[in-house]
Amino acid sequence: MKPFKELLKTSADAHGHLCPGQIVGVRMAMLGCRLIGLEEPTRRDQIKKLIVYVEMDRCTADAVAHVTGVKLGRRSLKFVDYGIMAATFVNLETDNAFRILSTEESRDLAALYAPEAESKKEQQLEAYKRMPDSVLFRVHEVQVRLGEYDMPGPTRRKVACARCGQVVRDGREVMKNGQVFCRPCSGGCYFYDAREVSWSGMDWSPYGDSIILENIRNRSTDFLVSKARSIRALDVQT
């Protein structure tokens, strides 16, 4: 693994600024990878063995992702919204997993480790670099339940929502009265009062002849109208 200073610089550059959370995240990732035996997590032969769960959507999460190379799009980065400064590192080959938590005591001890710093932020920036891992973190060895649909790789299951027709991937559908629904149609999602809209420049494409696109759009409209009628008919029947 690259040296701490190099990882911190590249992580802060990618994140947009240097902050205490970046330092904690870089060190957390370095420790987590070391504990599960993946010293070069971004290397091709190791990256497929790693899954990381982050429990916060803060600066630390960006640093953990940067150091380990995990990504949402590769399904190697999992976000669980616990609001806790913690991450769990899983070696898929060995099933070894460790959950690492940033200690609350480390904040209180920052002044002791960086007495020369003038502000609280400066104290944390310096102290979190100097503290031993045993002060900055608590570590739990854990077991992680990983189902078939949680694994990286190709999509393993696709089903269509009975109401809107949207395809739902990897077992994230909701079953109601023997029918398959996506989460928005099942009533359990983060948004509400959804209304489809048109927008200025909606026919723009980085590639494409405008006449060809107009012909395709007209045919697409006919298809969507037909589909909407089918869905309304289904609503009436149910």
Image: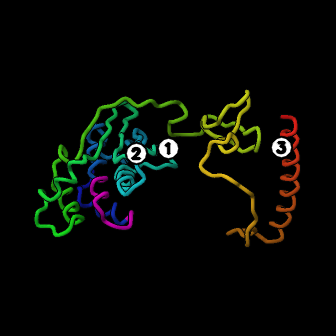
Local SS, label 1: loop
Quarter location, residue 178: top right
Residue beneath the point at 80% across and 66% down: 213
Q: Quadrant of the C terminus?
A: top right
Quadrant housing residue 164:
top right
Q: Are marks 2 and 3 in contact (CB under 8 Å)?
A: no
- Name the chief secondary structure element in magenta: helix
Label 3 CA crowd tier, 10 Å (few <14, some 14–19, many 20+): some
Q: Position of residue 134 (x, y in %)?
A: 18, 43
For image coordinates 70% across by 54% down, the residue present is 194
Q: Is residue 14 left or right of residue 6?
A: right
Residue 16 painted magenta: yes
Q: Secondary structure at mark 3?
A: helix
Circle 2 packing at 10 Å, graded few (<14), some (14-19), many (20+), is many
Question: Residue 231: which numbered mark, if any?
Answer: 3
Residue that label 1 marks: 75
Residue at 30% in and 41% down: 100
The image shows residue 192 at horizontal and vertical percentages of 66, 52
Q: Secondary structure at mark 2?
A: loop
Please tell me which of labels 2 and 3 falls first in the chain.
2
State the residue position of label 2.
55
- Span shown in magenta: 14-26
Mark 1 or mark 2, which is nearer the start of the sequence?
A: 2
Of 119 and 180, the residue lying toward us: 119
